[in-house]
Image (cartoon, rainbow, N blue to C red):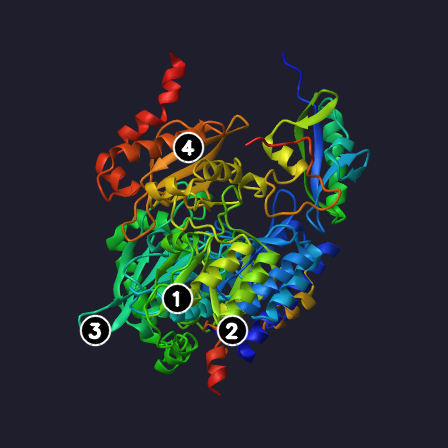
Amino acid sequence: MYRYDEFDARFVAERVEQFRGQVARRLSGELTEDQFKPLRLMNGLYLQLHAYMLRVAVPYGTLSARQLRMLARIARKYDRGYGHFTTRQNIQFNWPRLVDVPDILAELATVEMHAIQTSGNCIRNVTADHFAGAAADEIEDPRPIAEIIRQWSSLHPEFSFLPRKFKIAVSGSPHDRAALRFHDMAVQIVRNDAGETGYRVLLGGGMGRTPYVGYVVGEFVAKPDILAFLEAAMRVYNEQGRRDNLYKARIKILANALGPEEMRRQVMAEFEEIRRSGTLEIPAAELARIDAYFAPPEFETLPDTMPEASAAFAGWAKTNVSRHRAPGYAIATISLKPIGGVPGDATADQMDAVADLMDAHGIAEIRVSHEQNLVLPHVRKRDLPAIHARLGEIGLDTPNAGLVTDIIACPGLDYCDLANARSIPIAQKISRRFADLGRQHDIGELKIKISVCINACGHHHAGHIGILGVDKKGVEYYQLQLGGSGAEDASIGEILGPAFDKDEIAGAVERVIGAYLDLRAPGERFLDTYRRVGIVPFKNVAYREQLHAAY
Amino acid sequence: MAAPSPQMLTANRLSDGGVLYWKAGAWVEALDEGEIFADAPPAEAALAAAQGFVARNLVVNPYLFDVRIADGAVHPVKEREIIRAAGPSVLWTQKPEPGSRISEEIEYEI
Amino acid sequence: MPLIRDGSFVEDDFYFVPDGKAFPEEKGVIVTLARFQGEKDTLLAHHSRVGVRLAANENPQVLKSDLSRLAAVVLEFPKFRDGRPFSWARMLRTRLGYRGEIRAAGDFLPDQIAFMVRVGFDAFEVRQDFAIADFRRALNEITLAYQPAADGRRTIRELRAR
């Protein structure tokens, strides 16, 4: 993984001292809250319901054991002993004091971490396929380009006051595990006919009040030109994105208003100008230098056999272990969705234990997935039983990756100032209802995603079952959407009908799943059945209770 | 015409973001120790006075919210203010601080 | 309005002429884009230094053929959150090759000044109570840059290569 040199280290250190000065000026009143707010947001610091919330960047979702231990330390020393992993691969602390944040940032800087641009109307954390560098279907690891984009976008003087936030994702596989088509901009590694790798660039995807699936603006951008291309798109957006209406300010609105042809024309014209100037061309030496940081570990020659252990191990391996490109190795998903638990949360003790586990088995890095789980990318198959056993001791062995209880949920009204309703209790309810593992396996792959405001941090539009919490006259209600997908077959979920209250929603979800089980053809996942039969059968069963009650 | 809802005044402490309630020209941390305004004039007066604390960089974003009195206790009307007073309704990974606001009373039956 | 140029307070040697008002005798005048486009020749004939003030939605491209004759371009920040002037300044300085004064006016924060200097602003209309110490601090807090802009500063990549 990337290692800071003296320049990277000094950059972050200066940023910490700058923020320390800004905090001091806020506390003394030299800065008003209005003046301070954009500054603290650009350092990832929100003021939420109960306290401040600090969102720490985890670039392309990659952490070392040392960094994971520092996150545990921050949780213990400055917070309430836990952290929350987000749908953008970052981590959030819910209880830091403003006066402590400069010290928190200083401690993070000692392990090459920061909270730069995790909020604000600027380019946010670049997310990546959480199986990067390990997946069997990968063309190339996308994290080198993610790192190049991260550096280019850090404190970019032209693009720090965009119409709205800007989210970029990267992937190196034809199978999209990074939800590229729901990002403001996305970079996918592709191979051309000559066998060279380059980048396909997508633009204009997004969740929120008006969800859109993005479209291609660049079919094949050569590697040295990618920053020029991205900068061109950013400039078009900065110049023309709407500034009059917060809810119409994302690039997806502009992309839809201009249409693909006109957007491509404008981006290409700007791209040609930048390329002509040569200022953003990435030298081959630089591409190679960054690539070297992400060189895979030395894989041993190992027999490619899955060890036999307990039935519990086999059950866990069935869902939580994925195919690795090196024989004898596997990718292991650590579920942060214990039955009835808070999706994405981990205690400081758990973080430390996982770091120890990494050291014990020579696993140098761990990933945060946008589905709020952790991923060990390079695990020797023969080590899996011991890892599974240890995960069991620390409560992280839930064998539900990709199943109905692997729910994605934003923090919701329990924490978030923007929320209309609570999300976590709904996730807990649904999780408990489907606790039976046999039942979960019968249902198969089913992605439930819960958001409770139009910012859609739970990515509900991309849920096979999406839930959006709303406020109806001060009461929490939940709207169901079906058939969303964040993969390469991207689709936006369709709203089922009127919202359900907090006591009805879990039952409605259960009836919808019941309809799938009744209607499915052999081998069909929930998403497949929905796409085949449409929404009407699901609508009928979901509202059956209401129909009965009416009579 | 229905009587207006009683109100209370809340803000966040600048230094640590903690939730505060107005009481007689000062701030307390516990909802049930806060001052209840029966009608608009004292509520507005308190809100105006609270601006002084904003100007002295002690609190941010003071605002009034509706409450109701039931069984001799004060309850916020909106879910958001109930949660602000009592802490997150979900008790799993977080360990409540000793003496924290996560009250036994406000039990969320899931 | 106090003016900072080259890091110090200076007397403003331009006079902003609102639309509809007659031109003063001053040598240096600033007008809106609409007025410049309407009265260009007269303006340039009677004043030795002419500047144009652009609103945030006005792309400086429209001034391309006139830039060599303009002593100043003023870019307005209607709200500090409106980041369009950052692109306008950078395009003026780089692609359009403008060598005159690029001035910031309107609502901007001291903490934006470092970005503004990087994209080519060299003059700032500030509030009465603005302290020059804030300006100097803003410029010196972050000494490194990852990406090229309009200030010709060596990027981190270039520093690494040395």
Residue A504 makes an appearance in the image: yes
Mark 4–mark 2 Cα distance, whole angstroms, equals 46 Å
Residue receiving disc 3: A195
The chain under label 1 reads A
Residue C71 makes an appearance in the image: no
Q: Quadrant of residue C144?
A: bottom right
**On the rendered structure, is B35 left or right of C105?**
right
Numbered marks: total: 4
Name the amino acid, label 2.
Answer: Ala
Residue C30 location (% of width, % of height): 50, 60
Residue placed most toward the observer, C97 or C26: C97
Which residue is situated farthest in the left direction here?
Answer: A193
Name the amino acid, label 1.
Answer: Lys
Residue receiving disc 2: C145
Mark 1–mark 4 Cα distance, whole angstroms, equals 42 Å
Up the image or down, A204 lies above or below A365; here it is above
- How packed mark 2 is, by other alpha carbons closer than 10 Å (few <14, some 14-19, many 20 or more), is many
Determine which of the numbered discs, if any, sits on residue A479 in the image: 4
The chain under label 2 reads C
Mark 3–mark 4 Cα distance, whole angstroms, equals 47 Å
Mark 3, mark 1: which one is toward the viewer?
A: 1
Q: Quadrant of residue A109?
A: bottom right
The chain under label 3 reads A
Mark 1–mark 2 Cα distance, whole angstroms, equals 44 Å
Residue A255 location (% of width, % of height): 32, 51
Element under disc 4: strand
Which of pointers 3 and 4 lies earlier in the amino acid sequence? 3
Asked if labels 2 and 3 share a chain, the reply is: no
